[in-house]
Image: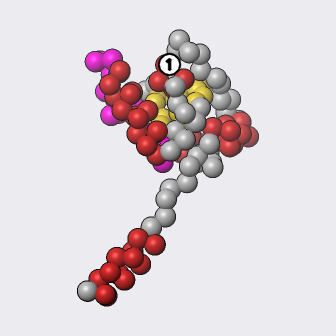
Amino acid sequence: MIIAVLALCASACGKSTPPLYTRQATSACLQKAGHAPKAIGAAADFVANSATGGAFHVTLPGNGVTVSFGQTLGDADNIDQAYRQFHSKNVGIDDVLRTQGNAVMLWHEHPSDADIAAITGCLKS
């Protein structure tokens, strides 16, 4: 019994929480990489504008992405759920919505691997 409790404690202690990315650090990295994050108007995307950690839009060659940040992982889940609830019926949301940690990425079109790498490579805390 004692060994089982110790094993459980050891496994719990080994778990690490994912980093919490920030709009400021991520935006600075993207700017340095030659991309230009832009603010999002309230009328353009009310979900992104309600993100607790802020949001921005990046235009890439042939695609664009809105990146919204939750201050917690739970906030990011709420952003993801809001996009899923309010998407147009003709949008394959599973194809254009990605979440990594507390960052939620809504792509204009299906993202290429290079598009994803450009954004996720700059997710910074």
Q: Nearer the viewer, residue 72 or 62?
A: 72
Is residue 102 covered in magenta?
A: yes
Q: Amino acid at mark 1?
A: Asp
Q: Nearer the viewer, residue 59 or 57?
A: 57
Q: Residue at x 41, y 78 (%)?
A: 10
Is residue 60 covered in magenta?
A: no
* Image x and y of residue 70, in percent: 52, 38
Direction right: furthest residue: 32
Above-or-below relation of 93 to 25: above
* Image x and y of residue 41, in percent: 59, 16
Q: Which residues are magenta?
A: 88-103
* Image x and y of residue 104, in percent: 47, 37
Assess disc 1: are there few (<14), some (14-19) or many (≥20) residues with their C-alpha within 10 Å of its C-alpha. few
Residue ID for mark 1: 45
Q: Residue at x 29, y 18 (%)?
A: 90
Q: Residue at x 63, y 38 (%)?
A: 23
Can the viewer see residue 61? no
Q: How many marks?
A: 1
Direction top: furthest residue: 43
